């Protein structure tokens, strides 16, 4: 029996390819070329599955052009590159990789918040450029993290993991905003003082360090824009480890330039890998190239999760992390 065809949207660990080749006719992408819509569509011809790394435009038009496509499996937790409604309407399985990157991304989110509060990027540039010639009482003074109020917008797995770090490790007071408040047990699990749900206006007003960890949807495009930034304390920091587009980067650059907030830490951008030029010119923003989940162990777990889903889909198992479980009764997808 012919194996189903699988397109790798990007390069991944060779071990994963070896495992996939047991079940699929794999078209790898060892050069790690980024496929635009036309190239992706051309290469998907006759293939039943796509291994996605979240950068590819998996749109309704792609599903329409490829009625043979049965599964799109992502190695990422975010899946805003996929039109899930269009996939579901056609019975196409979509899977993501939740859980496996929670603690790693929380580590980076917390580190970026700290680097932002304590001006570490600016301080390192200062030293490297030879400006450190003497001690001074107010040299690169930042704001305290310990004991401060940590605000979390988007209290999912990663938001809660960042909140635990703040509450348990740094004695921070945690406030959060989410569409739905956490169950009281989950709030209490954040730390000795728990975490408190507040409305968005209160979150913006009270946070010393605001961290964004919500998934990107059309509804929260520019959830942080000029109006929201204006409600924050002038001493506050803003950290985004979620997705570009949640923050209006131009409005943020203006707020940082005018010191309407103290500083920002960004791991994600509206048009990444292009960074808004105004941000690049500012001293009070720490800029990272989307490395939230980037540890060797976690990247391996993420890839394995996508492979597990793909293999389950071809072997009659239950894919462990479906985004659209409603298509599961339509199984088998790939046999
Ligand atoms: C990925 C992420 O590295 O899982 C996610 O949603 O943001 C990261 O872990 C990124 O999506 C790669 O494009």
Image (tube, rainbow, N blue to C red):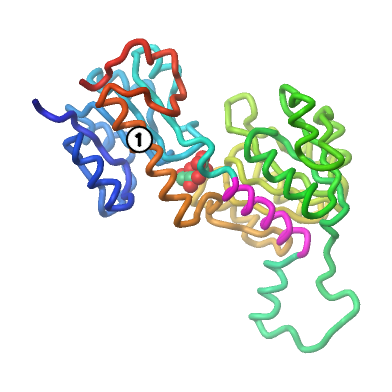
Placement of 282 over or under 15, stated as above or below: below
The quadrant of the image that shows the N terminus is top left
Residue 64 sits above or below residue 38 on the image: above
Residue 74 horizontal side relative to residue 4, left or right: right
Q: Is 328 in the magenta? A: no
Compared to 312, does 289 lie above or below? below
Q: Position of residue 281 (x, y in %)?
A: 65, 62
Left or right for 170, reference 35: right
Name which residue lies at 83% across and 36% down. 203
**What span is in magenta?**
103-118
Q: Is residue 114 magenta?
A: yes
Residue 235, horizontal then vertical, whole percent: 87, 53
Question: Which residue ends up furthest to the bottom in the rendered image?
Answer: 133
Looking at the picture, tell me which residue is in the foreground, 86 or 110: 110
Residue under numbered circle 1: 308
Crowding at dot 1, Cα within 10 Å, few <14 / some 14-19 / many 20+, comes out as: many
Q: Quadrant of residue 191?
A: top right
Residue located 33% across and 49% down the image: 12
Q: What main secondary structure does the magenta stretch of the protein show?
A: helix
Does 168 sit left or right of 81 as displayed? right
| Residue 181 x/y as whole percent | 76, 24
Name the residue at 73% across, 22% down: 180
**Residue 278, relative to residue 9: is it above or below?**
below
Q: Position of residue 257 (x, y in %)?
A: 76, 56
Residue that lies at the very extreme toward the left in this rendered image: 1
- Quadrant showing the C terminus: top left
Front residue of this view, candidates 130 and 313? 313
**Quadrant of the image occupied by residue 193:** top right
Q: Nearer the viewer, residue 5 or 276?
A: 5
């Amino acid at each position: 029996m012919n194996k189903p065809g699988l397109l790798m949207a990007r390069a991944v660990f060779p071990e994963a390819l070896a495992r996939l080749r047991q079940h699929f006719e794999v078209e790898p992408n060892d050069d790690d070329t980024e496929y635009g819509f036309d190239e992706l569509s051309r290469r998907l011809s006759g293939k039943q599955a796509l291994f996605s790394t979240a950068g590819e435009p998996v749109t309704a038009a792609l599903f329409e052009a490829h009625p043979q496509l049965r599964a799109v499996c992502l190695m990422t937790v975010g899946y805003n590159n996929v039109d899930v409604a269009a996939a579901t309407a056609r019975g196409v399985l979509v899977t993501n990789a939740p859980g496996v990157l929670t603690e790693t991304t929380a580590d980076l989110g917390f580190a970026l918040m700290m680097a932002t509060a304590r001006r570490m990027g600016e301080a390192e540039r200062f030293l490297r450029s030879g400006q450190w010639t003497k001690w001074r009482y107010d040299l690169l003074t930042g704001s305290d993290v310990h004991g401060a109020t940590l605000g979390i917008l988007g209290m999912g797995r990663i938001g809660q993991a960042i909140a635990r770090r703040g509450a348990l490790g740094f004695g921070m007071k945690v406030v959060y905003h989410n569409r739905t408040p956490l169950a009281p047990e989950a709030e209490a699990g954040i730390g000795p003082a728990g975490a408190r749900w507040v409305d968005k206006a209160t979150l913006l007003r009270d946070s010393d360090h605001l961290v964004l960890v919500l998934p990107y949807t059309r509804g929260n495009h520019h959830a942080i824009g000029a109006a929201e930034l204006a409600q924050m304390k002038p001493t506050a920091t803003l950290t985004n480890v979620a997705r570009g587009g949640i923050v209006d980067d131009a409005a943020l650059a203006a707020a940082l330039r005018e010191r309407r907030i103290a500083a920002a830490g960004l791991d994600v951008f509206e048009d990444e890998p292009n960074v808004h030029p105004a941000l690049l010119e500012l001293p009070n923003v720490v800029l990272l190239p989307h490395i939230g989940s980037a540890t060797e162990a976690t990247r391996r777990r993420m890839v394995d999760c996508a492979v597990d889903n793909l293999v389950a889909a071809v072997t009659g198992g239950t894919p462990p992390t479906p985004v659209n479980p409603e298509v599961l009764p339509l199984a088998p997808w790939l046999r």
